[in-house]
Structure formats: C-alpha cells, structure tokens
C-alpha cells in the first residue's frame, strides 16, 4: 500500500478546542527550523516569556510554555507543588476538576473534594468550609473556565479565601487565557497553566504556565524530588531560566514555539482586554441567536463563559446526527456533552480566531437548517436577525 500525503479539509472549529488556527500562525510554524540553543532562538524565547507575562498579567519570573499540551501544564503544577502526605482541596464541577483529583492522588497526597453540580461555578462558601475543616490544607486547586460545562469560577474570591488560611492556589486557565479576564498578579495566583489551542488559537501541544515567588519558594523547599523527571521545574528552569547560560534539558519544539510566539504577538496587537471584550460580544450575538430559536443554556447567566456555550438539546432531536451533519455537510465542528451531559447538550466554542461575526452567523444558519430537517421544535427564520442586531449594536 502506498500512503499518500495527508490533506485535511478546511473545517470551522467551534467546539471545545482546538479552535481555528490563524493562517499567520501556520505560516510562522513553516519557517526554517534552527537549533534550540541558537542565540536567535534564545532571543525569541526571551520575547515569548515577556508575551506570556503580558497574557497572564504577571511579572512572575517563572513563566514559560511547557513542551506538551494543557494536561502536562496541569501535571507540572501538581508534581512540583504537591508532595506525598500533603492535603489538597480540589474543586470538582466538571471533567477537569476530576483530573486534578487524579493528579493529587498520583502525587501521594490526599485530595479533599469540594463538589458542585456540572454547569455550576465553584461555590466559594464550600471552599471556605473545607478550609475551616482542614486547616492543614496546602493547596486549593480549581478550574477557572470549565470547558466540559461552560461555567466560569471566581478566581479572586477563592484566592483570598485560600491565602487567608495560608494555602496556595493552582488554577486551570486552559480555556480562559486570552478569552476571559485573568489577572495573575492582582489576584495573587500561585500556579497557573493554560493551553495553546483554545483562546490563543495556536496549534495544540504547548502549555503556558506561571508560578508566583511563593510557589517557587515552595518548590525550592521540597523534601522529595518531583515525581516526574520531564516536568521537574528545578531542571526545566536551567533551560528556560533566561540569560545566556541555558543548559540542554530536552529539545524544545522549535516550530511549535514559533507558532505560539506569533499567536501571542497577535494577542498583543489586538490588546488583551479587547480580546476579552470580543469573546463577550460574540457570545452575546450567538446567544441572542440561540435564544431566538428557543434553545436554552445549561449554565446560569452569571457564570456563563463567553468562549464555551453549552446549549440544551431540544426534545426529540438526535444530537449526534446534528453534529455529524454539521461536520460533513458544513465542515463545522461543534462539541458533544461529556459524562453526565452526554446526549443532553452541545458545546459551541467561540475561542480565539474562531470568535468572529462570520462564524457566529454561519453557525446559527447551519444549525437552524439541520434542526429544521429534524423537525425540531425551534423558531425558524429569526436567529440570524437577533444575532445581527447584537453585532451591529456592538459595532461589528
Ligand atoms: C482542554 C483543557 C485541558 C487539557 O488540555 P490538553 O491540551 O487537551 O491537554 C485542561 N483543562 C481545561 C479546562 C481544558 O479545557
């Protein structure tokens, strides 16, 4: 069998990630590969650190892209900060909180679970109660933007509660970075990780992370070695530590990093706050269209993420058939519900380069056609008008 080159179709990615990758980023990634210790590459990495500090709103020295996807950023935070015997409060309100619990257990530590229903934000009162009941808690870990449900949790409030009891916080910002307000220094976040392929609209496979001086002190005072050699920050820092004396740790994913650099340059060109605003504006337009059709949201309005819209599947509709028709006929990818939400919701992403007025209108139009074909109980011919009104009001 002679295998030919792989040529994927051009899709519109409006699921939970990856999002559409801007052509500028793909072009940057096709530039010549140079050595990972080449002075010019090292210069690019110094810029990368400054760009990530901008995106995270932090001055943290230890800010870098881990050479692996968001899950590895998650693991980097846990294996470096958590030691056997530690107590860690883990807030679970969706898939990713559950993974944090797994990480804590694999570090030989004890997770204290604070649970909220899928679709609800983390309840700060429950966190406060757990801290009171467990005064020896070392860390509170939670997800700012739960991609499995579309719920947004309040980092600033939980941070204050944890710090008042002397605990650090680990925040999952994989889906929030670039799309929702996130202020690492102002909110005193100790450890945070994100991903390249959600609101930064880069290709998957890199995980920006940042650690406060308090977190760095905790890592330096470890009694045991981190469980992972690859993710051990005391070793990674020798490469990313800055300056001219970078030592080989692993070969950096050179071209992938060109892509992330370009993505962050684009974020800076747009302006971080403007990017947050764009995600909100387009969410409001998409939502107006859904609501005009008669579709409802899973998450209560006050906790809704702009970049991840979980919409309830109407009665009698074959939700999987809707997704496959959107993909096959319109080249439009949307997400399915996960876990307990499987078959009950669709997840519409509006992340990074996917968050455009064109995509909002395209998505509503394609969805309406497919739902109409299934004789779904929706209002027809009104969604685009409702969305357009919002777009015009917002100046798009
Ligand atoms: C996507 C995602 C992850 C995992 O990132 P990968 O790049 O898929 O490893 C973790 N947390 C949240 C909230 C996510 O949305």
Image (cartoon, rainbow, N blue to C red):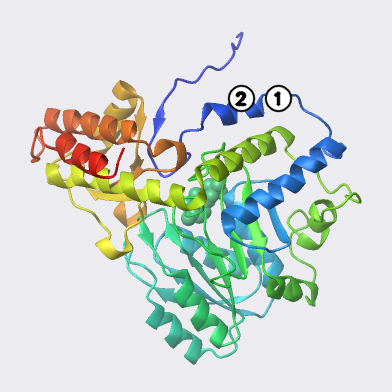
| x 53%, y 81%: residue | 162
- Name of the residue lying farthest toward the top: 2
Instruction: Identify the mark at residue 27; answer none if there is no mark.
Output: 2
Q: In this view, does 295 lie above or below 25?
A: below
Circle 2: is it few (<14), some (14-19), or many (20+) Cα within 10 Å? few
Position of residue 69 measured from the top left corner of the image (x, y, whole percent): 60, 46
Q: Can residue 109 be seen in this view?
A: yes
Direction from residue 253 to residue 87 in the image, left or right: left
Q: Quadrant of residue 365?
A: top left
Q: Quadrant of residue 39?
A: top right
Q: Which of 273 and 98 is in front in this view?
A: 273
Residue identified by numbered label 1: 31
Circle 1: is it few (<14), some (14-19), or many (20+) Cα within 10 Å? few
Position of residue 275 measured from the top left corner of the image (x, y, whole percent): 45, 47
Direction from residue 154 to residue 393 in the image, left or right: left
Q: Is residue 312 above or below residue 330?
A: below
Q: Nearer the viewer, residue 292 or 44?
A: 44
Task: Give how far apart the Cα atoms at labels 1 and 2 are.
Answer: 7 Å
| x 67%, y 80%: residue | 85
Q: What element carries label 1?
A: loop
Position of residue 330 measured from the top left corner of the image (x, y, whole percent): 31, 24
Evaluate if marks 1 and 2 touch, with contact meaning CB atoms under 8 Å apart. Answer: yes
Q: Is residue 67 above or below residue 231?
A: above
């Amino acid at each position: 069998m002679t295998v030919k080159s792989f040529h994927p179709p051009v899709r519109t990615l409006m699921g939970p990630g990856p999002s559409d990758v801007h052509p500028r980023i793909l072009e940057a990634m096709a530039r010549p590969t140079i050595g990972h210790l080449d002075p010019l590459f090292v210069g690019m990495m110094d810029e990368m650190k400054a760009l990530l500090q901008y995106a995270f709103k932090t001055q943290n020295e230890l800010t870098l892209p881990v050479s692996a996807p968001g899950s590895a950023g998650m693991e980097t935070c846990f294996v470096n900060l958590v030691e056997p015997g530690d107590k860690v409060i883990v807030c679970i309100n969706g898939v990713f909180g559950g993974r944090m619990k797994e990480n804590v257990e694999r570090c030989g530590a004890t997770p204290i679970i604070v649970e909220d229903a899928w679709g609800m934000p983390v309840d700060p009162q429950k966190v406060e109660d757990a801290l009171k009941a467990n005064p020896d808690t070392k860390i509170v870990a939670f997800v700012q933007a739960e991609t499995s449900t579309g719920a947004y949790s309040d980092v600033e409030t939980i941070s204050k509660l944890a710090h008042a009891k002397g605990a650090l916080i680990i925040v999952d910002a994989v889906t929030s970075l670039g799309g929702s307000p996130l202020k690492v220094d102002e909110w005193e976040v100790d450890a945070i990780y994100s991903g390249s392929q959600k609101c930064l609209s880069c290709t998957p496979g890199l995980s920006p992370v940042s650690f406060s001086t308090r977190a760095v002190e905790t890592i330096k005072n470890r009694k045991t070695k981190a469980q992972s050699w690859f993710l051990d920050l005391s070793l990674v820092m020798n490469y990313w530590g800055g300056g001219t004396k970078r030592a080989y740790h692993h070969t950096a994913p050179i071209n992938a990093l060109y892509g992330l650099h370009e993505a962050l340059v684009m974020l800076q060109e747009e302006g971080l706050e403007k990017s947050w605003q764009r995600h909100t504006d387009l969410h409001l337009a998409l939502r107006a269209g859904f609501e005009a059709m008669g579709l409802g949201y899973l998450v209560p309005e006050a906790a809704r993420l702009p970049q991840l819209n979980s919409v309830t599947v109407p009665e009698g509709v074959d939700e999987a058939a809707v997704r496959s028709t959107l993909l096959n006929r319109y080249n439009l990818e949307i997400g399915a519900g996960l876990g307990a939400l499987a078959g009950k919701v669709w997840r519409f992403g509006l992340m990074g380069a996917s968050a455009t007025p064109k995509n909002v209108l395209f998505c509503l139009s394609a969805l309406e056609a497919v739902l109409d074909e299934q004789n779904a109980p929706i209002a027809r011919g009104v969604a685009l008008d409702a969305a357009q009104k919002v777009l015009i009001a917002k100046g798009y």
